[in-house]
Amino acid sequence: MSPLVSPLAPDDYLGLIDPLLSARHPAGRVVTVRPECAGAATLEIRPGRGWAGHRAGQYLPVGVEIDGVRHWRTYSITSPPEAPGRALTITVKEEPGGRVSPHLVHRIRPGAVLRLGPAQGEFTLPEDPLPPRMLMVTAGSGITPVAGMLRALAGRRFPGPAPDVVLLHCAPGPDEFLFRAELAGLAARLPWLSVHARYTRTAGRLVPEHMGVLCPDWYDRETWACGPDGLLDALERHWAAAGAGERLRVERFRPAPVLSPGVGTTGGRVRFEHSGVEVEASAAVPLLETGEAAGVAMPYGCRRGICFGCLVPLVHGRVRDLRTGELHGEPGELIQTCVNAAAGPLALAL
Amino acid sequence: MSTTAVPVTLFESLEDHMEPLGEELDRIRAEIVAARGAEDARYIRTVIAVQRGLETGGRAALAVSLFPPAWLVGTAMLTIAKILENMELGHNILHGQWDWMGDPAIHSTTWEWDFLTPADAWKHTHNHLHHTYTNVVGLDRDLGYTILRMSPDQPWHPVHLLQPLYTALLAPVFEWGIAVYDLEADALPSGRKSVRAFLGDLAGLARKAVRQAAKDYVLFPLLAGPSALPCLAGNVTANGLRNIWAHTVIFCGHFPGDVQTFSYEEEQLDGETRSQWYLRQIQGSANIEGGSLLHILTGNLSHQIEHHVFPDLPSNRYAELAPRVREICARHEITYASGPLWRQYASMWGRVLRHAVPDGSRKP
């Protein structure tokens, strides 16, 4: 088929019939919008042909078109890894003054089409076997990736003994506790799950020193924590001090930190072919910034690796993904310049 | 329409030109940038859907084109599809007019068009060289496409006696002309382009041209089975008509008699102000007047003046911009070259003929 539609792809025609048929630009259709607590809603999304699935706990880049402009945000997937054809859900909490979250919570309607990036993130349940004892510490919308994991666990049949799971969730009050009724129901039905809520409006904020009371064996449970940075920083210090640092996994709701250059990563000279510009690029600075600093008119988008608005074809050379440290780059490959840095000399077709 | 020699503006005459021109046009630009939104996005998606629909329908009809009415309908649909694809989509998307949508499917960095010259090569010669040095003799290679003499400031050679002939012959094979032109072989002797870069571009062109030619002249005719020959004829016709139309629109946008050319030195352009740049863009282009169908089929390059002043604003906005730019020109007493298609076309040919012969007015 491809030579017949050159320079397009068959996908470009399929996507016109229904965006969900496009594999090149994966998309999903909103099936239902369900209000959760105040200022939060769950979107049920039926993914199209390009969707590659996810693991419980991962997050989803979502491209939302508002006034003709596509904005990308990431939201934790709150549904368990789907059976084929099943919809997935994200739960969005409105950020006051935000652009995208109020749109998704209040204005989007069933039938709307969203672009979907590939599911990302390592804040997931380990492959089998599961650890025998687990602890989830969450606050606010930090419950969302953990809800996905708990729902996945609740749907599983364990051949041996089920793992023992404790959820410790902080919310200002019961009305702000996302999925409260559902999680309470699960805890009542499943002997291996216990859920503790801490309502900060009355009980005050959680400090790690409370752990000894709230979950006496916390230091030898495999732990997942997601919430505001202050809480996560305190948990990390506490776990490290107890020598249990390697049993704590945290998920922060902000762009992945840029890698510092490791051994053997030296950057290199970057040539912008059509602009006739050549500059030295550091191994730790995204090519987008390198180009902009050199006066090249660089295409850009979200600047955090999710929208693919900054794609530039690589002419030759290799690049390093600053999020993962992975080396890649083939001639002609479209490079996301906002999250890739030079790994040796390279040329971009720009 | 003036039949005297084409005016050539010297840099000095621009120097005292009013700064408000730049400010006024910058304000209009900012206004449109702020107003771009869902309606514009819907427009370009509609054009894409219509274009792909026409192309699919045209190909289907040509598959059974032994039946003459199917040949006519199929060829007409494919011609319109190719015109839309080339001008309203390819030209304008590659200018980055729709990059603001943040849609990688409609983006200047990822778009490739059904034209022989690869998008990257064209973006360099067109977006960079032509739009920067518009109508500056010796710098803007589009001024005559290296083979035509369109200004008294270009030296005359006997070969120019033939330029009416090769201008006419170029039209139906315009995409081949552009593809060869984008290779910039003329930049090799001076070293402005390395042999290595030239060979790289040549390979890129060969790859693209083989794919595009194979599609229209081999694969689709083969698929048409008994209708192979009429299908081939329909594809040749559609490409030929698209080429003639593109050639017409581009020549009418740049070469009618009242479009000026400029004899600056490159160093003088370094000090060019925003106002002077705008003025040169206005004086270096010409509009074609007509209805909205004409505008869409020209990719809104019928608003060539607005396009040259604001090359990266979405094309569907040029029609609303035109009266405002025209009013500003009238107020500042700047010539705004505009006329119906037949008049711009006749005037363009007048210029081709006029400069085919030596005019003796060239300064030493």
Image (tube, coloured by chain):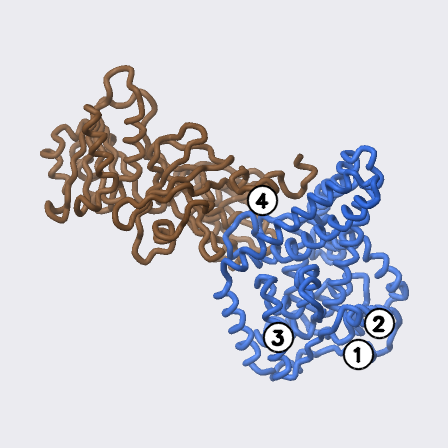
In front: label 2 or label 4:
4
In front: label 3 or label 1:
3
- Can you give x and y, in whole percent of width and height, for residue A249 in the image? 27, 34
Task: Specify the label residue B285 is tagged with.
Answer: none
**Above or below, B306 relative to B126:** below
Do the dots labelled 3 and 1 sit on one chain? Answer: yes
Q: What residue is shown with label 2?
A: B350
Q: Is residue B224 left or right of residue A83?
A: right
Instruction: Give the crowd class for mark 3: few <14, some 14-19, many >=20 residues within 10 Å.
Output: few
Task: Specify the label residue B323 is tagged with.
Answer: 3
Do the dots labelled 3 and 2 sit on one chain? Answer: yes
Q: What residue is shown with label 1?
A: B1
The amino acid at mark 2 is: Gly
Q: What residue is shown with label 4?
A: A16
Cα separation, mark 3 vs mark 1, equals 21 Å
In front: label 1 or label 2:
1
- Can you give x and y, in whole percent of width and height, for residue A259 in the image? 37, 42
* Mark with earlier residue (3, 2): 3
The amino acid at mark 3 is: Pro
What colour is chain B?
A: blue
Question: A310 or A185, which is in the foreground?
Answer: A185
Question: A267 or A189, which is in the foreground?
Answer: A189
**Above or below, B130 relative to A196:** below
Question: Can see residue B188?
Answer: no
Instruction: Give the crowd class for mark 2: few <14, some 14-19, many >=20 residues within 10 Å.
Output: some
Cα separation, mark 3 vs mark 4, equals 35 Å
* Mark with earlier residue (3, 1): 1
